[in-house]
Amino acid sequence: MPALKSSALKTKQDDRHRIDLSTEETFRFPNGGEVVIYNAIDRETDDFRRILACAKFFANQGKTVVMTPKLDVPYKDPAYDMIYGSLRGTPYYGKCPDLWVDGDWYEHEGYVHYNPKTNFANMCRRGFRQSNRIIVEDCGLTDGYMLRSIEGQLRSGVKIVELWVHTLKRCRLVYKLKADI
């Protein structure tokens, strides 16, 4: 689990990279699922609301979800290894995925254009640089189109474990690597 206790962690940081490493548990579900959010995250953005909706979806399934902060210079920030240390030795070390869900890292991606195919391609390109598990915003494409696109990316060497689509208040699994089941 990413570092969640902040009392000793603040003393290890130098002044150049000081962030608030304290967390708060904001949602707990009857089945034991919970959402924990770092206080360093800007809660006023639309992106935050979409990521929080995804976090609640996973927590509602009984999972522990941690919403993690973005760090400006991950390699120079001592907090990076405290939060994202489990990425060491992976191609994603130095990245800052959005969610930690029961030991797995997930990246959430949104879009800004009006072309659904371009949106999906851009979300996948950006997302799979951060994690092999991504959640994309629904851009109106069929699951068949997304699966064909994923198959093409797999053939070109992109490592993909899961692809979820976030639609309003729920997430839908579109692709999952069979060996990971």
Image (spheres, rainbow, N blue to C red):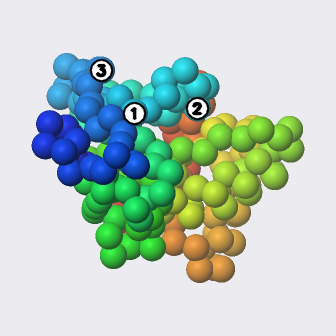
In this rendering, the count of numbered labels is 3
Disc 1 residue type (three-letter): Ala
**Between residues 38 and 10, which one lies in front from this camera angle?**
10
Instruction: Estimate how packed mark 2 is, as few (under 14), some (14 to 19) or many (20 or more) residues with alpha carbons within 10 Å.
Output: some
Foreground tag (2 vs 1): 1
Q: Is residue 146 above or below residue 139?
A: below
**Between residues 151 and 36, which one lies in front from this camera angle?**
36
- Per the model, the C-alpha gap separating discs 2 and 3 is 17 Å
Disc 3 residue type (three-letter): Thr
Residue shown at 35% from the left, 29% from the top: 39
Q: Is residue 137 left or right of residue 82?
A: right
| Residue ID for mark 3 | 26
Which image quadrant for residue 111? top right
Q: Earlier in the sequence, mark 3 or mark 1?
A: 3
Q: Is residue 40 above or below residue 99?
A: above
**Between residues 72 and 69, which one lies in front from this camera angle?**
72
| Residue ID for mark 1 | 40
Q: Earlier in the sequence, mark 2 or mark 1?
A: 1
**How far across and how far down the image is residue 67, in percent?**
38, 37
Disc 2 residue type (three-letter): Asp
Which image quadrant for residue 46? top right
| Residue ID for mark 2 | 47
What secondary structure is marked by label 3? strand
**How far across and how far down the image is residue 11, in percent?**
19, 45
Q: Residue furthest front?
A: 15
Q: Is residue 10 left or right of residue 181?
A: left
- Per the model, the C-alpha gap separating discs 3 and 1 is 14 Å
Residue shown at 77% from the left, 38% from the top: 112
What secondary structure is marked by label 1? loop
**How far across and how far down the image is residue 71, in percent?**
45, 49
User: Do callouts 2 and 3 mark residues in contact (Cβ within 8 Å)?
Assistant: no
Q: Earlier in the sequence, mark 2 or mark 3?
A: 3
